[in-house]
Amino acid sequence: MSDTVTLREIFDEDLEDVYCFLSETFNPDLGGWFNPGVTLDEWRLAYNRSWMPEKPNNGFMLLVNNTIVGVLCALYAQRQTQEGIRNVCNTSTWFVLDAYRSHSLKLMIAILGQKGFFFTSLSASPEVYELHRHLKFRSYVTTLVAIPNLPKLNYFSKKLEILADPESISRYLDSHIKQISVDHMDIPTVQQIVFRTFNETLLVIFDIRTVRGVRATNILYLSNPEMFYQNQNEICSYFLLHNYTLFTRIHRCSMSKVPAFSLEIKRNIALFYQGDFAGLSFPEFIYSEHMFFCR
């Protein structure tokens, strides 16, 4: 007689058990996604963000005899847009033990069965691209780009005011962008900075990564992509001098235009979404696992 597989929600009290399951069993060769370098504290911090009052769960899990055999984790956010409040469910780690992989779809069907959400999947492995499309996700294909951080040679260019402390950052942002900034404060690995001219403001949310031994500024969010493009020489020079990074890594989808001399690092990255996302800028990596886990 085969074991009975049951499905239920992942609640806050289950997070440690889910973390231990993934730490002990996750095999990237079988598909799914999990960064084994993530600590339990980092894991809890991600799922305990106050991005959505009264979140429904942290995703769903499969159990056999009260033992976890598969999970699909989710991060929830409530976003204010010009069209009103939008609820976003970002699906994250999806992993099922090989013996129970025939039950994998139950997890995604349970997630998508929740009403009133716009769904995103921003770290799917290529092994599940077609499965997402089968589930009526639409895809946005992007490229990861590296911009060389070169010293600024033209000292007569337009001067940017640079604000790095939280009080100054908050003072110059409109209400919508200010909320994004507040929601992403106090994440240990993430930094924020504001660049200002006399008539424009740009919030940049980023982290610092070492890729193949080279330090890079990894941009997670730009509030004003065109301003970044127009001032990228000064901004990337700042990253060189203050972050000691040789490159700025950013997805093509986050920019208005690609600066000259940029290098393509990785092509054909599919980002998936489902639902009516009117008022939301898609794709965005804020309010997702990219803020915590994707390194």
Image (spheres, helix red, strand yellow):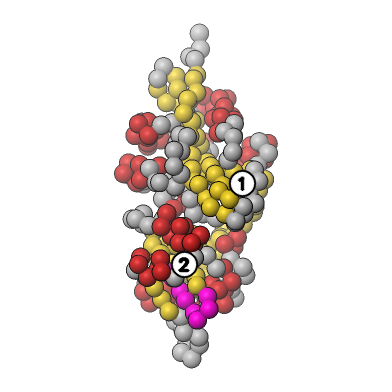
Q: Quadrant of residue 103?
A: top right
> Which residue is labeled 2 in the image?
173
Q: Is residue 115 above or below residue 295?
A: above
Left or right of 227? Residue 48 is: left
* Residue 110 showing in the rendered view: yes
> Which residue is labeled 1 in the image?
272
Q: How far from the left and from the top, in percent, is residue 14? A: 37, 31
Q: Give the range drawn in magenta.
A: 193-200
Q: Which of 98 and 181 is in front in this view?
A: 181
Q: How far from the left and from the top, in percent, is residue 70? A: 47, 29
Q: What residue sits 36% from the left and 74% below the top?
A: 242
Q: What residue sits 44% from the left and 19% below the top?
A: 64
Q: What residue sits 55% from the left and 48% below the top?
A: 85
Left or right of 30? Residue 164 is: left
Could you tell me which secondary element the residue under label 2 belongs to? loop
Q: In this view, does 186 lie above or below 223?
A: above
Could you tell me which secondary element the residue under label 1 belongs to? strand
Disc with the residue nearer the chain's start (2 vs 1) = 2
